[in-house]
Structure formats: C-alpha cells, structure tokens
Amino acid sequence: MNIFIMGAPGSGKGTVSSRIKEEFNLNHISTGDIFRANIAGGTPLGLKAKEYTEKGLLVPDEITNNMVKDYLMNLADKKNGYLLDGYPRTLDQAKAFEELTKGTDLAVDRVIAMDIPFEELTRRITGRRTCKNCGEIYNIYYKPPKKENVCDVCGHELSQRKDDNEASLKVRLDEYAKNTAPVIAYYDDKGIVSHIDASKSQEEIWSTIKETLKNK
Ligand SMILES: [Zn+2]
C-alpha cells in the first residue's frame, strides 16, 4: 500500500503518520529525508539539486520527481509500501510522478487529506505556548496551564513562537492551499482520496483512518 499524506501545518499530520507507519508497517518518508540523503550521498541528482539550493533557487520538478522515484525504488526494505509526506507539492509533480510510476509497484494507491477549518487551525497554532525550561507544550484553548502563562511542571514562564501568529499562519496556509488544492482535486477525480476531518479528536481521526485503509 502506497500512500501520500497531505495536510496543512498544524493539521496533525505528523501524529497520524507515525501511527499509520506502525500499524501498517510502511516506510514513512518525507521529501526532506530524500533531499538530504541524495545530497549527502552525492548522487548525480543530489549534486544537481544542491546547485539550485545553494543559489537559493527552487529545485526543478524533474529533479525532485526522479529523486523521489529513485529513493523509493532503492529502499533496502520496501516493507508494505510507503507513506510519503511533503510530495507531490504541485499538480505538475503529481502528473509526472504518475507517469514515472505507472504500472509499477511504486504507484500511489491512496491519498489521505487532513482537512481542517482555518479557525480551528488558528486556535491550534496561535494558542500554542511552550516552556523553554522543560519543553512542556500547552495550548491556551485546549490545554491551558493552571496558572496563566506559567508552566505547571516547572513554574517557568511560557513563551510563544514568533511566527505562531495569525498573519504569518495565513501566509503559510495560503501558499499551501494554492499548491495543494489542485493536487487533491486531481486525486479526487481518480477517487483515491480519503478526506479526514482533522478537527476531530485524535482517537476519532485514527479510527476513521484505520477503517479507511483496512477496507481499501
Ligand atoms: Zn516547564
């Protein structure tokens, strides 16, 4: 089973991914891992990609697509398939990947879309507070500290990450939506997308996903 997982930052993609990986014995891979492995390994594609990133340019789709395909092909242990996070980022990448993998065991079977309303995401992100002393994480809406702005565990003052504000979140999300919406629509047309309501509780989300994937 080969899966793409897509979701905005804050949609809970990470948590869900590790559970899918465990339950279904898949290789959980992010495009970041693939880039790092190719660049560190000095592969021809990695060297090309490095030329672009060093100039601060976006790596062209053709390089990215082939890098992803090579990486998946050459996994030492293919397990029951892959769970890929962060790819495809654009419609062009989605189409190219389909061409590259058509009829092979690398073709994607299922796309999980973590759908979440903007208001909910805003609360998740802008409500986030962390303790720099002990690392405890809070959310003023969902998991507030007993005393305002003070860590329950160690009594240290809580802080908020600078870019966890609504304006910066909107920029990140707009960018995400602009690129991803056409990709999801593309797979929707093929009937392989499982839309997950990511505003639900973690347990509800997980049982829906598990059912979806088991009945595939
Ligand atoms: Zn603390």
Image: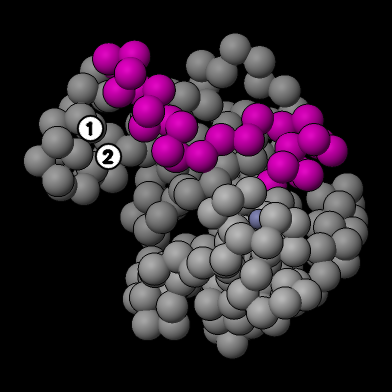
Residue 157, horizontal then vertical, whole percent: 57, 66
Labels 1, 2: front one: 1
Q: Residue at x 66, y 79 (%)?
A: 148
Q: Residue at x 61, y 60 (%)?
A: 156
Q: Residue at x 46, y 32 (%)?
A: 33
Question: Coloured how?
Answer: one colour
Residue 124, horizontal then vertical, whole percent: 62, 74
Residue 75, horizontal then vertical, whole percent: 56, 18
Is residue 111 visible to us here?
no
Q: Give the quadrant of the N terminus.
A: top right
The magenta stretch spans residue 38 = yes
Q: Is residue 84 left or right of residue 91?
A: right
- Say what secondary structure mark 1 lies in: helix
Distance between the Cα atoms at labels 1 and 2?
Answer: 10 Å
The magenta stretch spans residue 51 = no
Amino acid under label 1?
Answer: Ala
Q: Which residues are magenta?
A: 17-43
Residue holding disc 2? 62
- Say what secondary structure mark 2 lies in: helix
Magenta region, main secondary structure: helix
Along the viewing direction, whichever of 170 and 44 lies nearer the viewer: 170
Q: Quadrant of residue 29?
A: top right
Q: From the viewer's perspective, is residue 71 above or below residue 61?
A: above
Mark 1 surroundings within 10 Å by alpha-carbon count, few (fewer than 14), some (14 through 19), many (20 or more): many
Residue holding disc 1? 49
Residue 211, horizontal then vertical, whole percent: 89, 56
Ligand 1 is within 8 Å of the C-beta of the residue at disc 1:
no
Q: Residue at x 78, y 30 (%)?
A: 25
Of the numbered discs 1 and 2, the one sitting upstream in the chain is 1
